Image (tube, rainbow, N blue to C red):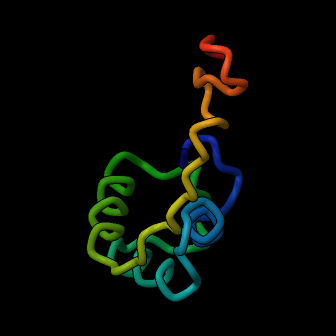
Amino acid sequence: MAATSTDNLHDFLVNGFSRVGQKSAEQMQKLAGIKGTRKAKGLSSEHLKALLVAMQEVDVPPPPPCLPLPLSDRRGDDRAGTGKGV
């Protein structure tokens, strides 16, 4: 993801990950030793490894749960009761 982003690191973290806000992004940047103004696309493999470790150390709430679809809305289910899948 970082390799294709045109954002700086801070914006990449805030906009690219669910529930990562300003404070969490700043903590990740500090732990990884990377300035938030640096382009995400230009991070070296060493920086990416450090960022991964930092992301695992910062407490971020899990993404919101998705609401399950009713069985009749799932692909391949018998929507019309005909005994045939979609």
The residue most toward the top is 84
Residue at left offset 42%, top offset 77%:
61
Q: Quadrant of the N terminus?
A: top right
Above or below: residue 63 compared with residue 24:
above
Residue 29 placement (x, y as % from top left): 44, 75
38 left or right of 24 in image? right
Q: Residue 58 or 3: which is nearer the viewer?
A: 58
Q: Quadrant of the C terminus?
A: top right
**Occupied quadrant, residue 9:** bottom right
Residue 55 placement (x, y as % from top left): 36, 68
Q: Residue 82 or 68: which is nearer the viewer?
A: 82
Residue at left offset 58%, top offset 84%:
22
**Occupied quadrant, residue 54:** bottom left
Residue 56 placement (x, y as % from top left): 29, 67
Residue 12 placement (x, y as % from top left): 61, 62
Residue at left offset 63%, top offset 41%:
4
Residue at left offset 48%, top offset 52%:
43
Q: Residue 62 or 50: which is nearer the viewer?
A: 62
79 left or right of 47 in image? right
Above or below: residue 26 compared with residue 12:
below
**Occupied quadrant, residue 78:** top right
Q: How many marks?
A: 0
Above or below: residue 31 compared with residue 4:
below
